[in-house]
Image (cartoon, rainbow, N blue to C red):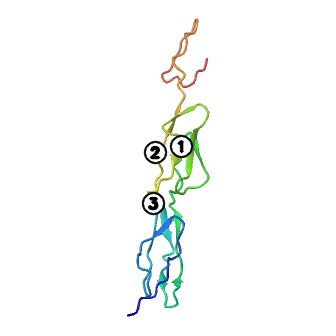
């Protein structure tokens, strides 16, 4: 009785895993990636008669969330747009940030949180002016 040739444990890939259990002659390996990563190059490895794996080893690359949304009267700072990276939102002078100022690239390829907004700073009701009148409604800036 003959035993099938085994190629042993196939090469591991970073942020990935081997889905195939059969490591004997003629078997074709299937790889997968952990959440937040996509399989790049659908390289296939096959167990050869000389007990080696033949073919191209695939790789797993981080999901790309794309450019984070811009906001009016503010800006967004970021270095990368891939899984686990962060984007930070800031408002121009005279505006307050409403919502989360930090967004993270998720495994789904979307940015966490909804986009914040920059609203004018509310100065409050102006004080009374002696021998004068105050006109206006929003009071985001005052001219005397």
What residue lies at 49% left-to-right and 67% top-to-bottom?
A: 16
How far apart in space, not on screen, are marks 2 and 1 (Cα)? Answer: 8 Å
Front-lying residue, 53 or 73: 53
Residue 133 image position (x, y, % from top left)? 54, 11
Label 2 near label 3: C-beta < 8 Å? Answer: no
Q: Residue at x 47, y 48 (%)?
A: 112
Callouts 2 and 1 close, C-beta under 8 Å: yes
Q: CA distance from mark 3 to mark 1?
A: 21 Å
Residue 61 image position (x, y, % from top left): 53, 65
* Secondary structure of the residue carrying numbered label 3: loop
Q: Residue at x 45, y 78 (%)?
A: 29
Residue under label 1, please give it.
Answer: 102
Mark 3 or 2, nearer chain start: 3
Q: Earlier in the sequence, mark 3 or mark 1?
A: 3
Q: List the residue tagged with mark 2.
A: 113
Q: Nearer the viewer, residue 10 or 87?
A: 10
Q: Is residue 46 left or right of residue 93?
A: left
Residue farthest bottom in this picture: 1
């Amino acid at each position: 009785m003959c035993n099938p040739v085994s190629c042993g444990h196939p090469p591991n890939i970073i942020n990935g895993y081997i889905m195939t259990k059969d490591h004997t002659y003629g078997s074709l390996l299937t790889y997968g990636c952990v959440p937040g990563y996509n399989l790049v190059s659908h390289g296939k490895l096959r167990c050869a008669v000389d007990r080696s794996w033949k073919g191209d080893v695939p790789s797993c690359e981080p999901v790309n969330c794309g450019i984070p949304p811009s906001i009016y009267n503010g800006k967004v700072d970021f270095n990368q747009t891939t899984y686990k990276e962060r984007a930070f939102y800031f408002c121009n002078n005279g505006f307050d940030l409403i919502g989360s100022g930090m967004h993270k690239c998720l495994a789904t390829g979307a940015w966490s949180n909804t986009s914040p907004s920059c609203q004018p700073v509310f100065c409050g009701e102006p004080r009374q002016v002696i021998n004068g009148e105050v006109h206006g409604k929003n009071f985001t800036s005052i001219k005397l």
